Image: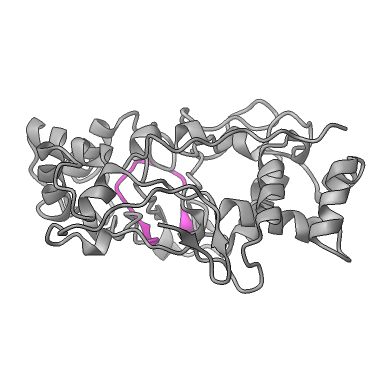
Amino acid sequence: MQWKAAAAVVPLLFWAVQSLAQPAGLDAFRRPDTVPFPENAPYDRGIATLGKMLFFDPRLSGAQNISCSSCHNPSFGWETPVPKAIGAADNPVHRHAPTILNAAWITPLFWDGRAASLEEQAVGPITAPDEMNASFEDITARLTAVTEYKAWFERLFPGQGIRKETILTALATYQRTIVSGVAGFDRWVSGDDAAVPEAAKRGFALFTGRANCVSCHSGWMFTDNKMHDIGLPASDLGSGGVSPQDPAGYFRFKTPGLRNIALRAPYMHDGSLPSLPAVLRHYADGGAAGIERQTDIEGFAANEGDIADLIAFLETLTDNETNVPTPILPAN
């Protein structure tokens, strides 16, 4: 199966999933066969390659000591295995680093939904003092001094060269190619009944039934791309704290997709839940104790077997065979 953009084939190395007799009720979770690229920034292999180099290049940080990949590490589901990622000043940032896996389908972006596009999103962490602490003026000058980068930008962006807009286009183009690979669950969706264990099938039935996880974690990415209050104790106002503040959005955060979720501990916007059992218990309990506000979760009865089955299902969403090699960066 090839993945296609609106006007070009995206050269990602996914293997075909043979279409067999499909288990009932799974079609809503079938992987798409195209990657959505905006009309004003269609897929271009060279631009995506350049964007990957920039994504892994510490030259995009003020002190040249961290890169985008420092907080979005492919080995950890494009997150980091700590509650709060460490910024350029060697201090924890405000929130847990969200995954950028399947970013082409995520809208809006950030935990609080304040960015409408990947191009807009990239500006935030690059320029935030507690994150990468850089300016595009300095980045442009730094990249222009690198002969190979100058040649790449002049060839790929004729008449524009290295500037804030082309840097953001390259980064966003690469990030739209970061797509989760085929997992056991996908083979099950396509009709291979032996692709997942029986415990995972029971877990899926719970997920879509009594536990009602699917009310927020729907579709092939397992997210509704909406904001929800899931009953965490916090002073962080979430989407309601975005200027201008909106009390209706207080404590609401973006529902993350669940692809490769087993690789992405700790969990939640604040990294407060260390493991999948802790997450599932949080939901089963209807949120943290002592939360007096009305939340979006109701809880459900779950014994240890139910929790084990749900985890078995979630583990089938992990792609264990996709490798993301680190690019060779141009020398100064």
Q: Is residue 77 magenta?
A: no
Query: Which picture quadrant has residue 234?
Result: top left
Image x and y of residue 69, in percent: 61, 36
Query: Which picture quadrant has residue 232?
Result: top left
Please tell me which residue is depicted at 19% across the width and 57% down the height of the picture. 20
Instruction: Count all numbered tags in the image, as a single digit.
Output: 0
214 left or right, relative to 139: left
Please tell me which residue is depicted at 52% across the width and 52% down the height of the picture. 110
> Magenta region: which residues?
225-240
The residue nearer to you, when weighing 292 against 74, is 74
Q: Is residue 292 visible?
A: no
Q: Is residue 237 magenta?
A: yes
Q: Is residue 223 above or below residue 313?
A: below
Please tell me which residue is depicted at 49% across the width and 35% down the height of the picture. 323
Please tell me which residue is depicted at 14% across the width and 47% down the height of the picture. 193
76 left or right, relative to 277: right
Helix, strand or loop: magenta stretch: loop
The residue nearer to you, when weighing 203 against 84, is 203
Q: Is residue 268 above or below residue 239?
A: above
Q: Is residue 76 above or below residue 177?
A: above
Q: Is residue 302 visible?
A: yes
Of the 4 image quadrants, the one containing the C terminus is: top right
